Amino acid sequence: MAAEKSESWDIELLSCPVCYERLMRKGPPGLNLQAIYRSVFECKKCHKSYSSKDIYLDLTVTAGLKKYVEVKPAGTEFFRRPFVSFIYERGWRQYFGGGFPGPDEEFKMAQEYFKPAEGGVLVDVSCGSGLFARKFANSGTYSGVVALDFSESMLRQCYGFMTRDPTTLLAANLALVRADVSRLPFSSASVDAVHAGAALHCWPSPSNAVAEITRILRSGGIFVGTTFLRSSPSTPWIFKPIREQSFVMFSAQKP
Ligand SMILES: C[S@@+](CC[C@H](N)C(=O)[O-])C[C@H]1O[C@@H](n2cnc3c(N)ncnc32)[C@H](O)[C@@H]1O
């Protein structure tokens, strides 16, 4: 029986958030929601199993724990509120100040930077309600897209937007994963591209997050992000208010 079971488990791109061992998967292959919903993921090392019974696949360290509650810093907790997630893409995101050129233009700019990663797997880290993840999936540029966020309500909003476009998006290789950017559930050097739109300034520890992103990117993989510039003690006071509000897009390639 045990031998039979191990034969029917496939090795996945996804890793256990506790020990980073590759997750074994039992179920249909593919990153689309149907396939993931019908699959069980299990870590053979720490014997924890993960499933997506709540729309998204929960790959946080605390997945499945019912009684333990951990409060994250404000930049993370704020976006877990259902009301914030609801209004985010229904007006707020489109009218960001600070010179953000708007989702269509930002998407075009990101796609340019991602050219070397075409055909690979892209992870949209802190995807919110999936504004960009859906565009990446719809573009057909990537073999798979993972929309990843810590906020349960943002991921539910993303699913809602996906159901408006059932023929393409629900069938596309677009997975919804709940995870913490400081503990990314992917094997080292397994991902071709990472996108993080307007997110860096919300992360509890940008340096830990960037270290994690570096770990999961394969050699030659690309990281593209946008954020607001912050002023520093050396910024002349006259420029401080302007600098605090400035849009910046950056890109880096892993050597
Ligand atoms: C301002 S929204 C950006 C959403 C989208 N990427 C965009 O371009 O509009 C910031 C996102 O970061 C997510 N976030 C905050 N802390 C996080 C963490 N520790 N791990 C993963 N995502 C986090 C929030 O849930 C929120 O969806």
Image (cartoon, helix red, strand yellow):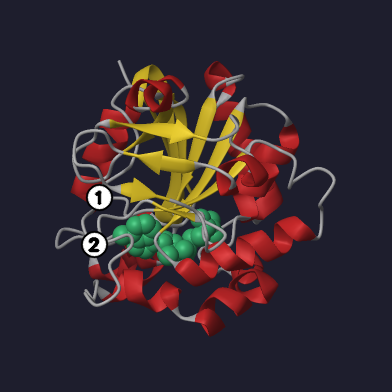
Residue 204: which numbered mark, if any?
A: 2
Taking the spot 29% from the left edge, 76% from the top edge, the residue there is 74
> Vertical placement of 21 versus 64: above or below?
above
Which amino acid, mark 2?
A: Pro
Residue 3: x, y in percent? 35, 20
Discs 2, 1 touching: Cβ within 8 Å: yes
Q: Residue furthest bottom?
A: 83
Most distant residue in the right direction: 167
Q: Identify the residue under disc 1.
A: 182
Q: Position of residue 48 (x, y in %)?
A: 27, 47
Which residue is nearer to you in this view: 2 or 74?
A: 2
Quadrant for the N terminus in the image: top left
**Residue 249 is at least partly visible in this image:** no
- Tell me which residue sits at (36%, 66%) in the image: 244
Horizontally, residue 154 falls left or right of residue 220, namely right
Q: In this view, does 85 lie to the left or right of 50?
A: right
Q: Earlier in the sequence, mark 2 or mark 1?
A: 1
Depth check: 180 or 23 in front? 23
Which image quadrant: the C terminus?
Answer: top left
Q: Give SS at disc 1.
A: loop
Give the percent coordinates (x, y) of residue 83.
55, 84
Q: Residue 152: percent from the left, percent from the top?
A: 47, 67
Residue located at (39% from left, 61% from top):
150
- Whether disc 2's CB lies below 8 Å from ligand 1 is answered yes
Q: Residues within 10 Å of mark 1 (few under 14, many from 20)?
A: some
Mark 1 beta carbon near ligand 1 (under 8 Å): yes
Helix, strand or loop at label 2? It is loop
- 83 with respect to 81 (left or right): right
Q: What residue type is labelled 1?
A: Ser
